[in-house]
Amino acid sequence: MARIQGRALEDFPPLVVDLDGTLLRTDLLMETAMAFIRSQPLKVFKLLGWLLRGKPALKEGLALETWIDVSVLPYDAQVIEMIKTEQANGRMIVLATASHVSLAERIAEHLQLFDLVLASNANRNLSGNNKRDLLVAHFGEGGFDYVGNSRDDLPIWKVSRNAHVVNPDRGVESRVSAMSEVQPTLHTNTVKLRDWRKAMRLHQWLKNALIFVPLLASHRFTQFELMRDGVFAFFCFGLCASSVYILNDMLDLGDDRHHKTKCNRPFASGRLSIKAGLIAVPALLILAFGAALTLLPWQFSAVMAAYYVVTLAYSLKLKRLMAVDVIVLAMLYTARIIAGVAAFSLTLTFWILAFSMFIFLSLAMVKRYAELRDARVREVTTLARGRGYYPGDLDMIASLGASSGYLAVMVLALYIQDVKTTELYVTPHVIWLACPLLLFWVTRVWMLTHRGEMNEDPVVFAMRDRTSQMIGAVFLLMFWIAA
């Protein structure tokens, strides 16, 4: 009988470890699919062609046409610790996975923990019964311990000596107990409500307050019916935006995992699965448009649809194009104001459009400046990951962004002089006092950004910052007095 460091192989059998959902808090098939869609969105129907040829062809096609950085994947620390403990005892460690062999071998090379790698290839999908048969052929029935998590692993646990269950799918743990000797289950990745709140970015819903700007500008904010419609529009737009945020996070997994804070996002860290995200995206979208079409004018749904399409284009391509990205961001902020106009059935004015485009372009530049400043602090000199800028572009971005903010103040000043303004206000010249307030706020935002104190979306910052709140209150007071 073969022996391992003085122990009989029958007493100390190989430890076979599954990859997706076990060693990794993610699924590499889903990872490569999202990476393919992001890099080649116009070839998305190629996925269907591979799938029609079978799952092995799909996995091989995705593995060969995408690049996944295995060094930043969300590995389960407790599973790795268990493997290292068994490896230190001289035990043979086997990686057996349904993922493509090219990915499995790169992961094995990165971790340096496995003596043998068994994986799918162009002719074989190593899952379920296929994996069971191959393991029995290598080690015999009952000749290995198996670490897994899903229903696909049930046939393997049935022929293993001991079963190690990690973050099991619902109902799996009880079924394993009935067929094999089960070691204590590892629960290392419990999904919590705050993970979904973070993925939906509910704090970003503050930006939807821009929907009420047209109502304030038209002096009709005291009408109950319009305020009610505004609340409906606020939540519908929020659900639509959350659908986009989740999709964007799944498309940006590779970039987020290289970012010092975004790596902690629920999908990048593996706390939420891509499969769950792919269910949430259409569910939120259906809820948003279903409610909008039922409760609000159809024009609001049309604006929301345009917002979704532009945001999707931004996520897939536009965010990596210099200058285009910040202009599109400004448009997306402005879309909320246009959505408010549609929800309240008001008339869109030149002044609102001009002011919002310039002020939001400035804030979009703030967002980019903050990201690039962080890269320069880390002494990065190459093109920012997922962006069209170099850290050396900071000075130009600051110049363009501050100029855009000051142009918004000029638009406000010109608005005061417009003939139609006198029809809305008794003393329109009082609004002039709002101009220095806005100048101060724009200058302050850029100074804080320059000092590295802008760590979130600038619009959300403005709604949370005490000084900005006070400036905003006085700003509105000037308009109220003028009216």
Image (spheres, rainbow, N blue to C red):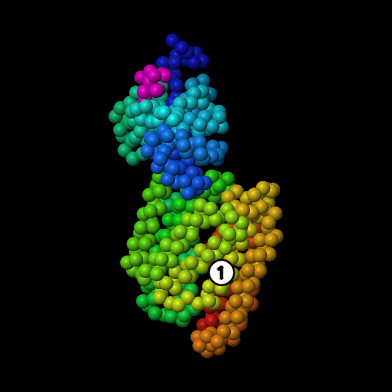
Amino acid type, callout 1: Met
Q: In this view, does 377 lie to the left or right of 228?
A: right
Q: Nearer the viewer, residue 89 or 29?
A: 29
Q: Is residue 418 visible?
A: yes
Residue ID at (61%, 56%): 322
- Image quarter hosting the N terminus: top left
| Nearer to me, 322 or 189 | 322
Could one spot residue 267 in this view of the protein? no
| Residue 133 magenta | yes
Relative to 8, residue 73 above or below: below
- Label 1: few (<14), some (14–19) or many (≥20) C-alpha neighbours in 10 Å: many
Judged from this view, the residue extending furthest toward the top is 1
Secondary element at image label 1: helix
Q: Which residue is drawn at 56% across and 37% down?
A: 71
Residue at 58%, 45% (x, y): give it: 258
Does residue 399 appear to the left or right of 419 in the view shown? right
